[in-house]
Image (spheres, rainbow, N blue to C red):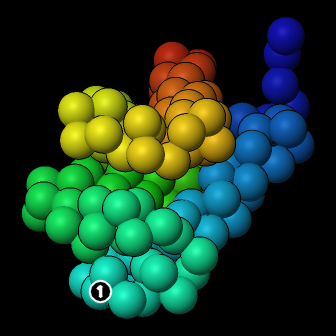
């Protein structure tokens, strides 16, 4: 498929397909939501989690998460936001940033298994984090696709 070319304030550049911009925009919005979720859980107390409707066991588990779990969440969500913005700005650096975000989410997924988060919260937590990993993989694949077609500078 041949894409139309447009004149910019410099060299001629291939126009990005609208669906590409839609997915990059979705990535930005999705990761902004992720930042809100990150801020709502990092550094919070067991009492805070109980006030959110968690059981005592769930609240205790969440309040005692190790630093590396918070770090993985932060790298995943802020990397996803930065990488999605880079996609929108046509920056080639989007690919490694989004891949690092994906790896961080995989670490978070492994941590949820190892620390008993999935067992404590059930299928809903598994489904949510599986969706997060799938979206991170999709954004990484989008960046790879665009990089291979020289759509990113």
Residue 113 located left or right of residue 94: left
Above-or-below relation of 20 to 52: above
- Would you call the spot at circle 1 few (<14 residues within 10 Å), some (14-19), or many (20 or more)? some
Image quarter of residue 64:
bottom left
Q: Which image quarter holds the N terminus?
A: top right
- Which residue is situated farthest in the front direction here? 56
Closer-to-camera residue (74/22): 74
Image point (12%, 63%), residue name: 67
Q: Is residue 44 visible?
A: no
Closer-to-camera residue (98/47): 47
Image point (84%, 16%), residue name: 2
x, y percent for residue 31: 56, 61
Closer-to-camera residue (33/55): 55
x, y percent for residue 124: 64, 42
Q: Which residue is mark 1?
A: 45
x, y percent for residue 18: 87, 43
Q: Is residue 2 visible?
A: yes
Image point (75%, 44%), residue name: 23
Residue 150 located left or right of residue 73: right
x, y percent for residue 51: 53, 87
């Amino acid at each position: 498929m041949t894409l139309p070319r447009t004149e910019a304030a410099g060299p001629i550049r291939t126009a990005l397909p609208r669906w590409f911009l839609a997915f990059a925009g979705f990535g930005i919005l999705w990761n902004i939501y992720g930042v809100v979720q990150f801020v709502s859980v990092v550094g919070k107390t067991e009492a805070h989690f109980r006030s959110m409707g968690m059981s005592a066991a769930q609240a205790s588990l969440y309040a005692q998460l190790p630093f590396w779990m918070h770090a993985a969440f932060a790298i995943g969500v802020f990397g996803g936001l930065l990488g999605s913005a880079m996609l929108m700005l046509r920056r080639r650096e989007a690919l490694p940033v989004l891949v690092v975000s994906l790896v961080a989410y995989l670490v978070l997924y492994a941590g949820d298994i190892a620390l008993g988060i999935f067992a404590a919260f059930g299928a809903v937590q598994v489904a949510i984090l599986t969706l997060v990993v799938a979206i991170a993989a999709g954004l990484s694949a989008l960046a790879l696709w665009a990089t291979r077609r020289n759509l990113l500078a």
